[in-house]
Image: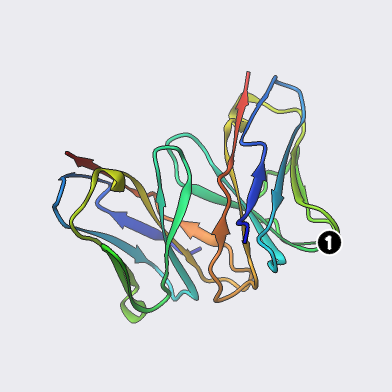
Amino acid sequence: GIQVEQSPPDLILQEGANSTLRCNFSDSVNNLQWFHQNPWGQLINLFYIPSGTKQNGRLSATTVATERYSLLYISSSQTTDSGVYFCAVGSSNTGKLIFGQGTTLQVKP
Amino acid sequence: NAGVMQNPRHLVRRRGQEARLRCSPMKGHSHVYWYRQLPEEGLKFMVYLQKENIIDESGMPKERFSAEFPKEGPSILRIQQVVRGDSAAYFCASSPGSRNQPQHFGDGTRLSIL
């Protein structure tokens, strides 16, 4: 099946810094989503982005489907950005999502 | 416009009991997915259902686990004779279609087995 790899596994930032998280996948996809799992365990839907670029406030994402990767940019990070960021892809007719192992982000004040 | 509703948020069971987890999809969504997150791990797909049909159960354990999505009412994930290893967060997601559609997730049910 399709493989999803996220990097880096862990990231520590000072408040105000920028960061880029990467998601590589091993096959063509028809769905790609980025999620933020907050310290309370809730999964927050950040982007649905099987291709192209989207922006939402301090966050933006780019997926280059032909090269099989997606990037999540966080600018001017805040302590509330802390948590785990998951990339998930779907490639089958049933639409099930395959999740990466996540990037754990800690933003220090 | 309510999102995906899961209940209970927390569920405690003793070994050997049954656990029932409920999921009401977003309004207008007829596709439901269940995922499991074991401690310190990512989410793993379990089962995909449409109304009254199981479409893909390739991620479901072979024994003790079952799922349904009846014509009326929420989707139910049922775990019989629970064991310690079933302790996890169980997430439900819904979408209006199966392909090229974002999935919207509920807040999950945290299942603890004593």
Q: Residue at x 69, y 49 (%)?
A: B23
Amino acid tagged 1: Glu
Whether residue B101 sits left or right of residue B51 in the image: it is left
Whether residue A105 sits left or right of residue B42 in the image: it is left
Q: Is residue A71 visible?
A: no
| SS for callout 1 | loop
Q: Residue at x 67, y 36 (%)?
A: B8
Q: Quadrant of residue A80?
A: top left
Q: Residue B112, how many percent across, how many down?
A: 60, 26
For label 1, the crowd category at 10 Å Cα-Cα, with few meaning under 14, some 14 to 19 and many 20 or more, is few
Q: Quadrant of the N terminus of chain B?
A: bottom right
Q: Is B79 placed above or below A48 here?
A: above
Q: Residue A14, how many percent across, how many down?
A: 13, 44
Q: Quadrant of the C terminus of chain B?
A: top right
Chain letter of the residue carrying label 1: B
Q: Quadrant of residue B79?
A: top right
Residue beneath label 1, please?
Answer: B52
